[in-house]
Image (cartoon, rainbow, N blue to C red):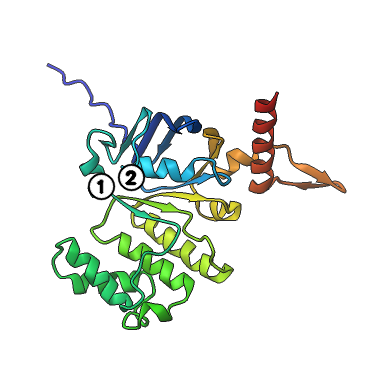
Amino acid sequence: MSIPPTEPQVEQPAIRVRGLEKSFKQVTVLRGVDVDVARGSIFALLGSNGAGKTTMVKILSTLLKADAGTARVNGFDVATQAADVRESISLTGQFAAVDQVLSGRENLVLVARLRHLKDPGAIADDLLRRFSLTEAGNRRVATYSGGMRRRLDIAMSLIGNPPVIFLDEPTTGLDPEARIEVWQAVRELARGGTTVLLTTQYLDEAEQLADRIAILHEGRIIVNGTLDELKRLLPPAEIEYVEKQPTLEDVFLTLVGAATDKEQR
């Protein structure tokens, strides 16, 4: 009796969204969004203000209920298994949620104790090291720069080792040096196997960080692919016989403009 070969199991995505819809009274924010996010990857969701990025993150993190469609995070349905989803994720909003009176280490220890984890001091010290904050660990957070506060905020969100983290416009209001510090922290997350869904308005941020990029425009995903795939959507420009590859900014503005023109016809 021969045993048939086992078929290789396809790893399920960390996040799977199908037909997601959401409206607030007469305003439709999401209009049937479909997205898959691979495990251990950085997925950037690009869009202008009001495109629906934060609404989508709130639905995926169980803070809002969708009107239609389905979404699964780490294998759990956000509507029927909300508690399991919350145990699998961490959410970092647009502003650092840190206590400025406490030191960086005290902030981390406090969160670890609230989560009833063993040896919160060791957890805090490890995260300070990972995010290059050891020397500043005993200083009050009020003395930190914007980039340091944001890195501490992200470090706090990792307590408990959630497999999925949502970063909602994490570099808003930061200066260029602080943004680079946060980018390094995000790359470190992905190298450690954490799945990162990043929303941003900064095209260079997505270009620097993301394995895949989706553009959300007026509640719909109008394109989803790698940076190279998106660049191939536009022909290279020739300037004085020198071929110029399109930037992500060129792709974004062209696609959003085309989508707007199509809807206005």
Q: Amino acid at mark 2?
A: Ser
Picture quarter containing residue 134? bottom left
Q: Residues within 10 Å of mark 1 (few under 14, many from 20)?
A: some
Residue ID at (48%, 68%) = 181
Residue ID at (52%, 60%) = 172
Say whether residue 134 is left or right of residue 203: left
Up/down of 173 relative to 209, above or below: below
Disc 1 marks which residue? 86
Q: Amino acid at mark 1?
A: Arg
Residue 70 spot, x, y in % from top left: 34, 29
Looking at the picture, tell me which residue is in the foreground, 5 or 128.
128
Disc 2 marks which residue? 61
Residue 242 spot, x, y in % from top left: 82, 48
Up/down of 132 relative to 235, above or below: below
Disc 1 vs disc 2: Cβ atoms closer than 8 Å?
A: yes
Q: Secondary structure at mark 2?
A: loop
Quadrant of the rendering where the C terminus is positioned: top right
